Amino acid sequence: MTTALKSYTFDGNFRMHRSGQLKSPTMVYETWGELNATKDNAILIFSGLSPSAHAASSEGDMSPGWWEDMIGSGLPIDTDKYFIISVNSLGSCFGSTGPASIDPETGERYRLTFPVLALEDVAEAAHLVVQHLGIECLHTVIGCSMGGMSGLAYCVRHPNAVNRFVSISSAARALPFSIAVRSLQREMIRSDVKWHKGNYDLGSPPITGQRLARKLGMITYRSAEEWTQRFGRERSTDHARIEDQFVAEFSVESYLENHANTFSGAFDPNCYLYLSHASDLFDLAEYGGSLAAGFKRLQLDQALVIGVRTDILFPIEQQRELADGISSACSDIRLAELDCIRGHDSFLVDMDAFRPVICEFFECCD
Amino acid sequence: MTTALKSYTFDGNFRMHRSGQLKSPTMVYETWGELNATKDNAILIFSGLSPSAHAASSEGDMSPGWWEDMIGSGLPIDTDKYFIISVNSLGSCFGSTGPASIDPETGERYRLTFPVLALEDVAEAAHLVVQHLGIECLHTVIGCSMGGMSGLAYCVRHPNAVNRFVSISSAARALPFSIAVRSLQREMIRSDVKWHKGNYDLGSPPITGQRLARKLGMITYRSAEEWTQRFGRERSTDHARIEDQFVAEFSVESYLENHANTFSGAFDPNCYLYLSHASDLFDLAEYGGSLAAGFKRLQLDQALVIGVRTDILFPIEQQRELADGISSACSDIRLAELDCIRGHDSFLVDMDAFRPVICEFFECCD
């Protein structure tokens, strides 16, 4: 654990949104910048499914964070002006309590005894950290991908505790296409003979299923256009021998292979299953019986919805739906439709497109 | 074997396009209608990856074929006017020689000793059947999906033996996105512990990998729009128990489950791997060094390219590229861009959209 990573353990039973509870869960988080005297300059960031709380480097952890080029002195999310908080999602495996954590009641890992996780739980766990930090009202909640839905849950459940919302490549609820993709990713892991219904040997996890799931992830996180430009039909290797015919032959296959190998060892499979499932479950329409009713519960001074036209997981129509819905409860709502070709992942890799939009949003807050 | 299914065994060594050869391969096929005296009314149909030669019912096999509503008396591909031939692809497992067939040299199944399959081999095997039937020049070659590429291979290799070409939801070569999807499908099968490097027990094939591959297939064969309209966030079952949380919960998940169960037992896994790989390999640019050079080798009187705007596997841009390329060698080329919402599979399920276009094409041939 780096000195940048802070920890807060809730003293009590944390009631889960669907059912069940966690005894004294721990949330880990990192912060950047200083909370001002009036405590009104705090920004809470919700990440996508896979990242840790380490969104940017700092003195306590010099390694680059997952949004390194977005958060810092003079950057769009400016650490000279704001106090920025990034909490590792409840259910994840990078310090916050999740299926890979020890259940204090049994002394064993939760694994599949962990209660059903909802993004409402991710939001409430972050809210506990915000309260612990003595912040009554957040300047802005920012959420990327799955984190956009967690952020929306935060805003709809605590309308008086947040002034602004930025949703990035997210949605008010998942489409059946996205559910189908995530369901198949989960099935890949569950089908691996090493999964053992969640009781896998930690020294020999279901890495094959994880690699397959990650590859399908990459296929949906990027765009066909990008790959056509980048790889075309370029070959990665020479395949003279017939035994090699099913080994990666095209560059795009090698690219997926390299990405899958990097990721698969780093994430706990059960945590992945829980967070993936939580992404399917979230539905703003649960707040009041319809999306329109859910949106009306928001109380925001300003909001920004950013989407990418090549995103197939959270397509541009969903960005329009989100902006349109938020407009019913917020007069200052902007929608930015970006032409990035890297699909859903653009917010992580196409900084030149995202920085100006986020920068402009915060400049208007001054 | 039904009485509709005919068989032709080539007496000799069939040289494969990439390398190797097959000793006396067998091709099975079905025909409908009558070959006229001048033998100029023959239509050859190339199917997608999965179907058998049984494209339509007939007296010899009353069961519905995969294109039942397209081929028949008074239908767009009119059996009153034309002699229609459908050959089971070389490499498939429905009668034509493929990896699941017995190698006459060893008395054992080929399995992975089968030579690398190219769509050129599928085309040449069909050409042998056409020659066997005494047909010098085909009225039309029609190819759907993978079959469109096999058909294009046929037309470019035998420019004097075909007058017209109809390409349906196909391409001049695969895009890296499609290669990535198919490569992942193959990896799902190869990763199944029951695959045993192709030497699976026939009584216990790698059904888990096949089911996963089929589900990914369905995700790319249909469209997100269709599923949004059809399923939305409808639930299929009640999931009260936590143990059930990863079981199909949304209707879209049950839909995929049902489709995967139907398909997976019916297709030989090795045959699937070979045909899938052949789809990646095909590239018209191999004929002359560029796509433009490849297209120029065609000699067609008429051609029709049909594509669907929601197809993500063979997207509409590829249909335009194909029509544009064919126009360099054929003055009577039409492009039909259809607004079907069922994606790549539309040619199998949205007959009302496809029938008029194909009907009009053949009426203009009269």
Image: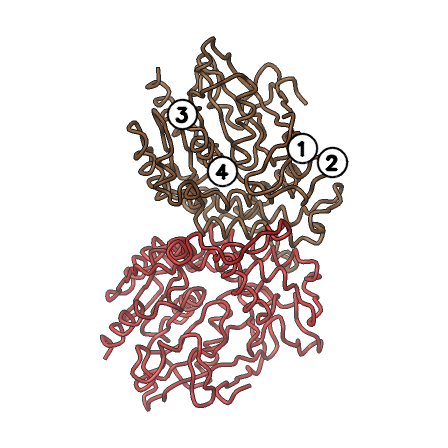
Chain colours: A red, B brown
In what element is the residue under mark 3?
helix
Q: Which of marks 1 and 4 is in front?
A: 1
Query: Do circles 2 and 3 both sit on a common chain?
Result: yes
- Please state which amino acid type lies under the numbered disc 4: Met
Work out whether mark 2 precedes mark 3 in sequence or the reverse, and give the earlier one.
2
Q: Which residue does the image show at 57% across and 51% down from the upper left?
A: B249
Residue type of the residue flagged with mark 2: Glu
- The residue furthest top is B37
Earlier-in-chain disc, 1 versus 4: 1
- According to the image, label 1 marks what residue? B23
Residue A202, image x and y in percent?
Answer: 68, 71
**Residue A191 at x, y percent in the picture:** 65, 55
Measured in 3D between alpha carbons, the distance from the residue under mark 2 to the one under mark 4, in whole angstroms, is 30 Å
The reply to whether callout 4 and callout 3 are in contact (CB within 8 Å) is no
* Between B187 and A284, the one nearer to me in the picture: B187
| SS for callout 1 | strand
Element under disc 4: helix
Give the left or right position of residue B267, taking residue B327 as reference: right
Is A193 positioned to the left or the right of B179 in the image? Answer: right
**Residue at screen point 38% across, 60% down:** A342
- Residue A180, position as x, y percentages in the image: 51, 51
Q: What element carries label 2?
A: loop
Query: Could one spot residue A226 in this view of the protein?
Result: yes
Q: Residue at x 23, y 77 (%)?
A: A363
Indicate whether A73 appears above or below B36. Answer: below
Q: Residue B146 carries which label?
A: 4
- Depth check: B362 or A112 in front? B362
* Residue B105: mark in rendering: 2
Amino acid carrying label 1: it is Lys
Where does label 3 land, which residue?
A: B355
10 Å crowding of disc 3: few (<14), some (14-19), many (20+): some
